[in-house]
Image (cartoon, rainbow, N blue to C red):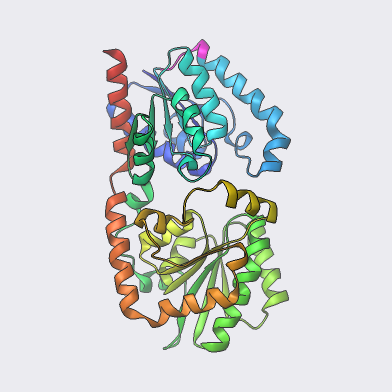
Amino acid sequence: MHIALVAGELSGDLLGGGLIAALKARYPQARFSGVGGPAMIARGLQSHVPLERLAVMGLVEVLRHLPELIAVRRQLYRTLIADPPHVFIGIDAPDFNLGLERQLRVKGIPTVHYVSPSVWAWRPWRVRKIARSIDLMLTLLPFEAQFYQRHGVAVCHVGHPLADEIPPRSDAEAARRALGLDLPAGVRLVALLPGSRMGEIERIAPLFLETAGWLHARRPELRFLVPAATARLHDALAALQAERAPHLPLTLVRERSREVMTAAEVVLLASGTATLEAMLLGRPMVAAYRVAPVTAWIARRLVTVSHFTLPNLLAGRSVIPEFFQGAATAANLGPAVLRWLDDAPARTELEAVFDRLHAELRRDASQKAAGAIAELLERKRA
């Protein structure tokens, strides 16, 4: 049994590592090849190309690296045609993987895509290309599966690995001890997560520092925690604080964003996977996002959903405040944070919603994905 997998970045590598382990349990003699990072290689993947060659973010960066990405895809196609896998699994990276999946499917190789593109949110006509490219879509979120079912695409909702990994209730005191925080009585913590990319730090961190200043002026007992994903981001955030808010009681933490969110009473964060993680941790949150003006103009014309944060999308209604572009101001964010700090019944109601959503996503994703792939292989053999 030969199984090929291609992940496009580290988040996909983590998914791939869990999937390979689950597939090995079903197919002990299987061999795995393709593209992956440390997690997939540790599980036995033979990676034909370094993961870093695919992990390109942003429109300008992708255009600059496009010739190399096309060359890598051609190389992978030739390698896989010369040694055909029993199934090919593209993990996220739709711009790279869907084209390769379509080429391989034409040659009779079953193809699976793991992690749906945001086709349900914008440019829904892309579903036609997806239908031509894959035999099976594996989705992390239930509303994604419903979208594909409506369009006649074979799909399986496998749940989200983060929901399997994070326990239903998180311990704030344990997180504070782990972070070495010795807080005086009466101190309350707010976590600020402006993003994990430099562009997000430049656009969103000044807003969050301004909001923290607004909050501290009204609630002197508040303290603020900010995780930095890398040393470069840590230095950028430290310089920004020194310039914009030198007297703000703020602690920068290298990495450890999950512990930072767990330790806090409320999280102010940029939209993205962090909103899902905060939801699974049971933390009240306020979300904001800012993009370049041209990107915002395009998004307003192409996006087809009314919410942009995962908790609201999963709930099908507004359960957390979210502010985009011009609405993302300290005057809006500050009062929204205060509401979560002051309104205990609202927090209790939100926790119940988060518990329900956590249970819906907790489905042993790697095992369920492996089972769906095994069923596809059985159908193809029949």
Could you say where residue 155 lies in the image, as x and y percent from the top left? 34, 33
Query: Observer-nearest residue: 353 or 121?
Result: 121
- Please check the rendered image and state whether residue 84 is part of the magenta-colored stretch, yes or no: yes
Could you say where residue 374 lies in the image, as x and y percent from the top left? 29, 25
Above-or-below relation of 219 to 133: below
User: Looking at the magenta stretch, what is its main secondary structure?
Assistant: loop
Could you say where residue 204 lies in the image, as x and y percent from the top left? 62, 64
Q: Quadrant of the C terminus?
A: top left
Q: Is residue 182 visible?
A: no
Query: Observer-nearest residue: 180 or 36?
Result: 36
Above-or-below relation of 86 to 215: above
Taking 53 as reference, is 135 left or right?
left
Residue drawn 65% across the image and 52% down it: 297
Residue drawn 58% across the image and 68% down it: 327
Q: Residue most toward the front?
A: 301
Q: Magenta residues?
A: 81-85
Residue drawn 41% across the image and 73% down it: 177
- Please check the rendered image and state whether residue 349 is part of the magenta-colored stretch, yes or no: no
Quadrant of residue 365 within the rendered picture: top left
